[in-house]
Image (cartoon, grey):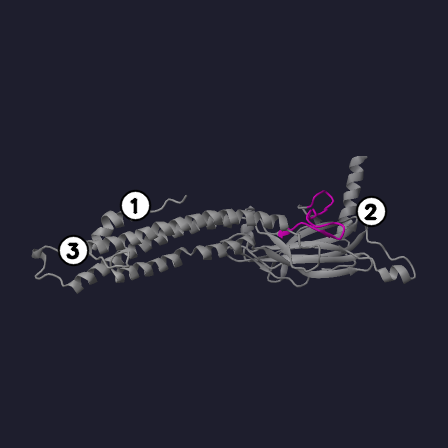
Amino acid sequence: MMPMRSGELRRLTCVGGLALLASCGSPPEAERAQPQTVVERKQTMLLATERAIHVIMEDVRVDLARVEAEFAATTASLPACWSLASAEPGLEPFGADKRRQRAAHVASAAHRRRQQLELMYRHYEAALWAVGTEAGRREGSDMLGTRTGDRELDRKIDAALLQLAREVDVDGAAEEANAIGSDRVALERQIRHELPGIGVFSLYKSQPHKVARGDEDEVQAAAVVFARAKPDLFDAEFGAGPAPQPPERVSFVQAVRRHVERGGLQIALTDWRFDPAAADASGTLPVSPEIDPANHVASEICLVRVDKSDPSFTQMRDHVLVSEYRTALRDDATGKLLAVIGWQVRFNVDFAGRMRVLVDPNDQVLPDDRVVQRLLEAASRTAAAGGG
């Protein structure tokens, strides 16, 4: 458990604390002209007790800061969790595994912190009563119904205990831990593209956020979701012909390029290529295993960020870095691309190298875009040449 400041308690109750209270006794005749009155002696005793309580509360704050720092260090290293801000049935499990893992880690750290706080409270509660009891004993107080022998002294210790409870705040720590354990980044739908008879292709993006506590740089997360069309019973019974059937197997193919801007002018640009985070050489994105593919297909989180360890990053200060994406929905049975969404994340890099996400409202469906198609054709030709 947490090493308590027991040396401070001994100092207060055995040496230092009693030294503060020693002024309650009668000093030698040579040191004063006349003996203190009863009122003066009691006032001196109460003031000495207040000084001892002040020392104890300073020790409480030191121990409390250590406990809080340990809890913060444990929880700050936990990765962010994600969810889709959608009421559509079937999408609730998105990111649920990581949310459960995060909640379990936070609960473990919170349990340890609660034990430390409760021990701390009992430890310093005993220290406060030890100081009060010793002060009452030195004054020979023996009032019935009191713990220290003096009713006013009891009230001072009770007030100090209320302050101790506010400082330690076990219940507040539990509420904070619950909030941290359930913390998540919600992705909101930016594009909803309906494909009649097939389904709905959607793009979700988060607001700019920081990955960890104390991190000055912002990032943005994105995911794409395909919701299969439900069969229309009316059309099936009274329609003129059979309705189109959603493809049995679909996947997402993603390409990316990056460019650098300054003052609204583009000064550097890379070629389009398949996303390095893809699951294969054809740019296929990994899908979330938590979502039932019978109704929905969702990609894993695409966390857009910049590698600041690259030596060339120093040249990017006071520039805008843009990651531009093309994400296509593909029918795996035919290889046909059913829809393409174009979206991007823009980073403003200041003189100090801090990165801020510039929210871009221009994400859109691109009906005639052939970027992904050309990359797929080139990959097919390369594979055929290699196979021959």
Q: Amino acid at mark 1?
A: Gly
Q: Earlier in the sequence, mark 3 or mark 1?
A: 1
Q: Where does residue 214 sit, x and y in percent of width and height?
A: 49, 53
Query: In the rendered image of this protein, does residue 173 appear above or below residue 385?
Result: below
For the point 67% across and 49% down, the residue is 300
Query: In the rendered image of this protein, does residue 249 appear above or below residue 46?
Result: above
**Tally of numbered tags:** 3
Cα separation between marks 3 and 1: 25 Å
Local packing at callout 3 (Cα closer than 10 Å; few below 14, some 14-19, many 20+) is some
SS category of the residue bearing label 1: helix
SS category of the residue bearing label 2: loop
Local packing at callout 1 (Cα closer than 10 Å; few below 14, some 14-19, many 20+) is few
Seen from the viewer's position, the closer of residues 343 and 271 is 343
Q: Quadrant of the N terminus?
A: top left
Dominant secondary structure of the residues highlighted in magenta in the image: loop
Cα separation between marks 2 and 1: 74 Å
As drawn, the label of residue 7 is 1
- Read off the residue under disc 2: 333
Q: Earlier in the sequence, mark 2 or mark 1?
A: 1
- Read off the residue under disc 3: 25
Q: Where does residue 349 sit, x and y in percent of width and height?
A: 55, 57
Residue mark closest to the camera, 2 vs 1: 1
**What stretch of residues is rendered in magenta?**
278-303
